[in-house]
Image: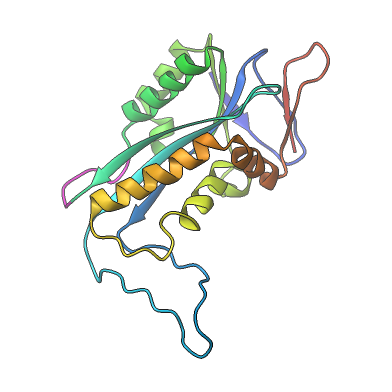
Amino acid sequence: MAGAGVGAGKKIAAVTGGWVVFEDEAGQTLRPPRVTSGGRRGRSPVVRVRGGGSGRVSIAGLACYRPGQVTRWFYRLREHRGRGEPMGFGWTEYRDLVVAAHRRLGRPLVLVWDNLGTHRCAQMLAFIAANSRWLTVIRLPSYSPELNPVEGVWSLLKRGEIANRVLVDVDHLTGLVRRGMGRVGRCPDLLEGCLAGTGLTLTPPHDQPADLAH
């Protein structure tokens, strides 16, 4: 079933024994993000990049938290190579990502995501209702990216693998994105740090479901 929004200072009860799962999506074009770099004194470092191109990679990610368990990361990529292709994920792709995470984690999920139209379409709402036994959805308040730890993952990617890079084509960009997402998946501490950056905490009260508190 669909849940209420998350308010500052309000605790959200998670499903007993389940995982709290944050979802978000991002996109990256062939023009890389610029970050601070070093160079010889008096000579500004210059990174030459492509002047155009319609290539793009979209990413949807799930950061999964459960007290006493290693934090997990799941993601899905979509490449855009030209005009006429969908620029975002369809509801079935979000559904398949959530289902895959549920199968891998083996427990109920409390899914926390924003009010993107695809998250609220009739098909998605029907899917959520049909799977309420293991899926509970909490909607983040509007304009509150600071409450979503997945935003921190995108920052890690843009300050890491793809920062200041000369991107040749979509395949090159996809390879760098996969490398960055793999790094996040292998380093649970990075995901824990992203959660800490939101100011949210995940604590299991005695004999009670885990609470997410701000």
Q: Quadrant of residue 210?
A: top right
Apparent side of residue 125 relative to residue 50 in the rendered image (left or right) = right
- Considering every residue shown, the one lying at the far front of the view is 40
Q: Any magenta on residue 86?
A: yes
Nearer to the camera, 183 or 82 = 183
Residue at 64 percent across and 16 percent down: it is: 15
Please identify the residue farthest to the right as the structure is shown. 206
Q: Is residue 34 left or right of residue 204?
A: left
- Residue 212 location in percent, x, y? 71, 30
Figure quadrant of residue 5: top right
Q: Quadrant of residue 120?
A: top left
Question: Measuring 32% from the left and 46% from the top, which residue is drawn there?
Answer: 175
Examine the rendered structure and indicate whether residue 210 appears above or below residue 153: above
Residue 95 drawn at (x, y percent): 38, 24
Q: Residue furthest bottom?
A: 42
Q: How is the image coloured?
A: rainbow
Residue 115 placed where, x, y %?
49, 38
Which quadrant is home to the C terminus? top right
Q: What span is in magenta? A: 82-88
36 to 159, vertically: above or below: below
From this view, report whether residue 168 is shown above or below residue 26: below
Residue at x 22% of width, y 58% of height: 54
Whether residue 25 is visible to the viewer of this picture, yes or no, is no
In the image, is residue 69 part of the stretch drawn in magenta? no
